[in-house]
Amino acid sequence: MAGFDRAAARNLRERFDAEFGLGEWREPFFVQAPGRSEIAGNHTDHQGGTVIAAAVDRYVRGVVAANEGKLITINSEGHPSSQIRCDELEPREDERNTTAALVRGMAAQFAKRGFVPQGFDATLTSSVAAGSGLSSSAAFELELGQAMNVLWAKGLLSPEELAVMGQAAEREWFGKPCGLMDQASSALGGIQHMSFAVPGKIDADPIDFDFADAGYALCLCSVGSSHEDLTDEYAAVPAEMTAIAHALGVERLGQTLEVTFAEELPQLRAAYGDRAILRAIHFFREERLVERRAKALREGSMYDFLGLTRLSGASSAMYLQNVSVAGSAEQPAMLGLAVADEMLGTRGAVRIHGGGFGGTVQAFVPLEQAESFCIGMDFVFGEGSCQIYHVDHDGARAWRL
């Protein structure tokens, strides 16, 4: 129960009682799901590739209890209340990109597996800020998944299956073509070296490594741009990679060889253009870099890990091209990378984090420099923009109160 926060549970329980009341028959419980940091593998998971991801100590937390009706009501601090009927679970176009879509989508995943959704009430709070690059959506999905698993499935579903269900809800109900890394990391906890070679299956191998023990802090800096208007830019990345894969006779790039791609490059370029080719080049390069970074962490070589991380960051910026939107005068993520790189030089490493196109910059910073680094980033992007994170080892969990 290392991840159980008694104070958070007590505060949420008080809010739940005030919002919903508490009948004698109710049995409330506490649910918690962490955000995640992508350590390696930028836009490789949706192509059947490999990643390294870590659950981090920012959480979606909630108190949940069944009710006697068919309504699922979610009261999330700082957001409008969401309410759906648990017997109306088809995707709705008017709910795209909303909380209600994720609630409906997760409930539908349980119904598809033969469980009977029933009404419940939930009071939630989140320190996984939307747009922070920590995948608040995946943490929310796993929070819901754990609650529904307790209420409807008696805890029978595994973390891996809940992660797959969360991805389906986000892709088919919410409308974002995400990979599986975010949900898997939140579900499993710790640092995980994961392969997604088999669609819908998570092959995870934990890495026992502590950045602080190696003398470094994991810092993430939100550069103050929202993803809300960038879904099309994000979607173009997997779409272009997948188009190249289909031209090579496979569903995803991870199912073909780099040499096969290289042999067909002139024809592919003529058919799909240079950007799609560059994004495919990034995929194969990043796959190699993921494996080498996993090896460096297992061997405790922070020096090698930092050098490889710099190469990964360069590949994302030059080839994947997910740092800024072409033609836009606003380039906050590129500015964030430049400022962080100027402060760190070769003492650390900087890269774009997660989906890109704004969002968050990731930095590995010597511990003795971490405080001054955050102050410097805050000076440019605002107080609290840059924070130090630690690995959460529990993953999404539920506890009886």
Image (cartoon, rainbow, N blue to C red):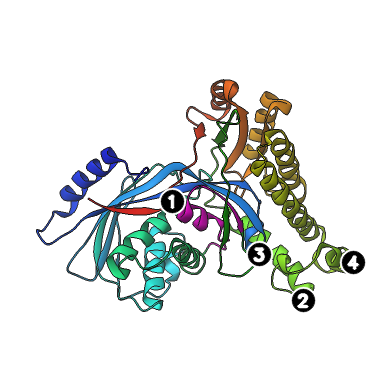
Instruction: Read off the magenta span.
Output: 176-194
Disc 4 crowd rating (10 Å Cα; few below 14, some 14-19, many 20+) is few
Q: CA distance from mark 4 to mark 3?
A: 21 Å
Q: Which residue is mark 2?
A: 249
Viewer-closest of 262 and 228: 262
Image marks 4 and 3: residues in contact by CB distance under 8 Å: no
Q: Label 4 amino acid?
A: Glu
Q: What's under tag 1, amino acid-wise? A: Gly
Sequence-earlier tag: 4 or 3:
3
Q: Of discs 1 and 2, which sits in the foreground?
A: 1
Report whether 125 appears left or right of 272: left
Q: Residue at x 48, y 63 (%)?
A: 160
Q: Tell us which disc is closer to us: 1 or 4.
A: 1
Location of residue 390 in the rendering, given as x and y in whole percent from the top left corner: 49, 37
Q: Which disc number belongs to residue 48?
A: 3
Disc 4 and disc 2 in contact, CB within 8 angstroms: no
**Label for residue 395?**
1
Give the residue type at disc 2: Gly
